[in-house]
Amino acid sequence: MGEAKVVPEMEVMPAVRSNVEAMTRGEIDIQITTAKAYPRSIEQFRKKALGMATIDEDTAASCVYKIPRDNKMIEGGTVRLAEIVAAAYGNLRVQGRVVSEDERNVTLSGGAWDIENNVLYSVEVRRRITRKDGSRFSDDMVNTTANAGISIAVRNALFRAVPHTYTKEIIEQCKLVARGSAATLGTRRQKALDWFLAEAKIEAKRVFAGLGIRGIEDITIEHLETLQGIRTAIREGELTPEDAFASQLPTTGAAADPVSMVMADLGCTEDEARWIDKAWETLKTPLAGRVVQVKQFKGRLADLKALLVSMLPEQTTTDSEPRKPGRPARKKGERTGEPAGTTAGEAPSVAGSSVAYAKDEMAKLAAENAAIDKEVAEAEKPTPAGKKSGFEF
């Protein structure tokens, strides 16, 4: 018998590579031809994507994430929404892979190619695979981290290939559906706090501080929308429980300290913040009304003072009560005939703003407070027997 001839690898590889390249090129050519023959319909894409993303509250909530950064919320579409968009958009190729791995990090790549328009995006992300003490994750955790990173890289590439003008409407509709109605507000508040405590180990006081409120009764539908986005970000690995609400916590004082909240939001001094807080106490302004005023007058401290001055009663004040700017504490037997906001010999003024302006602002705030009272009243109505809320935080 003759000896078997061993064919060197160098003689085989070029032919194999050539065949693989030819097959890949053929597949791509077929896809391009098909995409040109059957172009996508943007109207059909919108209907299909919206139908899938808003099929129920849970699905809608999983399509939007929110991450607190520098005292503001960054929001966007999640991996789940990217899957829906890819399925509805059509004529699209997406792929993800591991690029490299070292002792501390793993680098992942995601790509999205719009075959019809011949637009290709490729995005790389890095994920840490070490704990805080420097020890490396287990092999299973490394794989889990890599898979999550690939999903995020593919999502980022996809949302570049598909124009934002097509996806922003879907995101807004998902937010509306996920918010539900005020009728189930009480139950949803508690479910939200229960999830953060049980799953993320975040205490309620940190949640309250992050939202800038005092307690559970102050959580609104808008707050629930924010909490849903943060929850989704934690679930998808975009945000760690340790970082959630970290940038929102006050640097000093109690978590629910109204003076610290006013100082942070209005950029005023501590004395000014205490005056505003005492004015609210005197006027018995509810917390919802205070939040509305802080948001409305952000960057306009003088105007907020003018509004409060116009609303304070004309009566003798003590050191424990807020005084109108420029008015000293009255002594026993002192005449009180001077106009509001003036001392003897001074011309009348209202902290840099006209009384007419203050009355106009009062009317606006009255309308806003009425809307808030209506929402709270709707929330306190009992759910009819046998009717489910349809919401799971």
Image: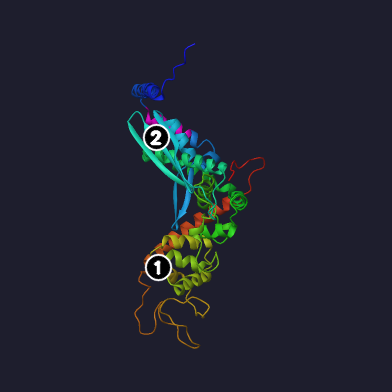
Crowding at mark 1 (Cα within 10 Å: few <14, some 14-19, many 20+) = some
Tag shown at residue 301: 1
Q: 284 and 106: which one is in front? A: 106
Let me know if residue 279 is in the magenta part.
no
Q: Main secondary structure of the magenta part?
A: helix
* Whole-percent x, y for residue 87 in the image: 45, 31
Quarter of the rendering containing residue 335: bottom left
Residue 330 versus residue 271 in the image, above or below: below
Q: Is residue 38 visible?
A: no
Q: Is residue 354 visible?
A: yes
Residue 205 versus residue 334 in the image, above or below: above
Task: Locate residue 129 relative to residue 344 in the image: left or right.
Answer: right
Which residue occupies the extreme right position in the image? 385
Q: 142 and 363: which one is in front? A: 142
* Whole-percent x, y for residue 102 in the image: 47, 45
Tag shown at residue 112: 2
Question: Which amino acid is tagged 2?
Answer: Ala
Question: Residue at image x 40%, y 36%?
Answer: 111
Q: Give the range drawn in magenta.
A: 40-51
Let me know if residue 47 is in the magenta part.
yes
* Numbered disc 1: secondary structure: helix
Task: Locate residue 356 relative to residue 203 in the image: left or right.
Answer: left
* Numbered disc 2: secondary structure: strand
Residue 156 versus residue 276 in the image, above or below: above
Question: Which amino acid is tagged 1?
Answer: Leu
Task: Locate residue 29 relative to residue 256 in the image: left or right.
Answer: left
